[in-house]
Image: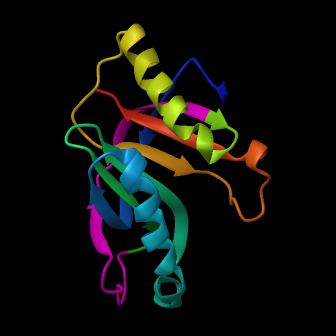
Amino acid sequence: MNLTHEPEIINWPATHYVFVEKVGPFQQTAGQAWQTAHTFVPDLSKNNQITRYMSLYKMGPQVYRAGFALSAPPVDLPEGLAYEEFHGGTYSQFMLTGPYTDLPAASGKAWNLVAEKNIPLREDFAIENYANDPRTTPADQLVTQILLPTA
């Protein structure tokens, strides 16, 4: 697994975010949420500019949001998608290079590294930002930013 071990502290900007939300164990809900979210892309793209694919999640209770950052508040949001302006904030960023199948282990390792380094966290959503397109990027070259909410 190709994961950075030293986090970079970054400031994530406020983001117009549309999403599908699922509650429950991530290994069951994440894939379902993304399958549903992807079905909305054609209709969502008709009136909105998608700027990134990203998920937001909380560990307890386990809430997973699969969704899309938009360049502006949504216009004619398809039924089944929710919207909020995600406020952003300070995050400890880890970078994973490799297939999405490495994400569960990489996320777990990132949380452990933050604990080992005594980095204070705040109660907020963690972020997985998918930096390149899996339709055109080989799996071993996919880049995912894993961002943990830092106090």
Q: What residue lies at 54% left-to-right and 66% top-to-bottom?
A: 51
Q: What residue lies at 35% left-to-right and 76% top-to-bottom?
A: 73
The answer to whether residue 89 is left or right of residue 55 is left
Give whichever of 79, 27 is nearer the camera. Answer: 27
Which quadrant: the N terminus?
Answer: top right
Q: Is residue 117 visible?
A: no
In the depicted structure, whether residue 49 falls above or below residue 12: below
Q: Position of residue 96 (x, y in %)?
A: 62, 35
Q: Position of residue 22 (x, y in %)?
A: 29, 59
The answer to whether residue 133 is left or right of residue 88 is right
Q: What residue lies at 77% left-to-right and 42% top-to-bottom?
A: 140
Tell me the magenta residue range: 73-95
In the depicted structure, whether residue 34 falls above or below residue 131: below
Q: Is residue 20 visible?
A: yes
Q: What residue lies at 60% left-to-right and 33% top-to-bottom?
A: 95
Q: Spot the residue most to the front.
A: 28
Give whichever of 140, 144 is nearer the camera. Answer: 140
Residue 71 included in the magenta stretch of the image: no
Residue 82 included in the magenta stretch of the image: yes
Which quadrant: the C terminus?
Answer: top left
Give whichever of 40, 52 is nearer the camera. Answer: 40
